[in-house]
């Protein structure tokens, strides 16, 4: 099962990449295929990041929401799209 990771990045030290990478590692140990937008390089526009992330999400079977995802406009949009697409929704523990 391919699982897209969503959560807050903007305004968090290191763009919250350590949390995304840890989630990807944990998911891979559970035999999921993590789709991790935190692997994207620095220097893209927010629109670029969202476009690539949404494409990744559209290829997923499920979405994994990191803690505090509700504080992120991007993660809220990804959650809404995942709901609309009928994906399985999993929330990470705080």
Image (spheres, rainbow, N blue to C red):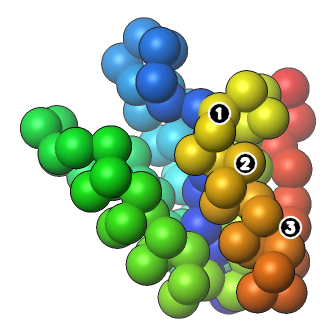
Most foreground residue, 15 or 32: 15
- Image marks 1 and 2: residues in contact by CB distance under 8 Å: yes
Residue 92's place in the image compared with 64, above or below, is: above
SS class of the residue under badge 2? Answer: helix
Is residue 19 visible from the viewing direction of this image? Answer: yes
Q: Residue at x 73, y 27 (%)?
A: 71
Badge 3 or badge 2: first in the primary sequence: 2
Residue 46 placement, left or right of 5: left
Does 19 sit left or right of 63 as displayed?
left
Q: Nearer the viewer, residue 7 or 76?
A: 76
Label 2: how many residues lie within 10 Å, few (<14), some (14-19) or many (20+)? Answer: some
Label 1 and label 3: CA atoms lie apart by 16 Å
Q: Nearer the viewer, mark 3 or mark 2?
A: 2
Count of numbered labels shown in the rendering: 3
Q: Quadrant of the C terminus?
A: top right
- Residue at image position (49%, 30%) is 9
Return the disc, 1 or 3, that comes first in the chain's sequence. Answer: 1
Residue 26 in view (yes/no):
no
Q: Are marks 3 and 2 in contact (CB under 8 Å)?
A: no
Tell me the residue that label 3 is attached to.
89
C-alpha gap between disc 1 and disc 2:
6 Å
Disc number at residue 76?
Answer: 2
Q: Nearer the viewer, mark 1 or mark 3?
A: 1
60 relative to 67 in the view: left or right: left
2 w.r.t. 10: above or below: below
Q: Which residue is mark 1?
A: 72
In the picture, residue 52 is in which quadrant? bottom left
For numbered disc 3, what is the local secondary structure? strand
Query: Residue at point 44% right, 64% down?
Result: 53
> Where's residue 63, x and y in %?
72, 67
Based on the displayed image, in which of its 4 quarters is residue 57 positioned?
Answer: bottom right
Residue at 84% of width from left, 74% of height from top? 83
């Amino acid at each position: 099962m391919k699982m897209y990771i969503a959560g807050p990045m903007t305004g968090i030290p290191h763009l919250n990449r350590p949390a995304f990478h840890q989630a990807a590692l944990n998911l891979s140990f559970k035999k999921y295929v993590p789709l991790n937008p935190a692997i994207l390089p620095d220097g893209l526009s927010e629109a670029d990041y969202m476009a690539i992330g949404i494409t990744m999400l559209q290829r997923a079977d499920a979405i994994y929401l990191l803690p505090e995802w509700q504080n992120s406009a991007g993660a809220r949009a990804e959650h809404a799209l995942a709901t609309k697409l009928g994906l399985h929704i999993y929330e990470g523990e705080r």
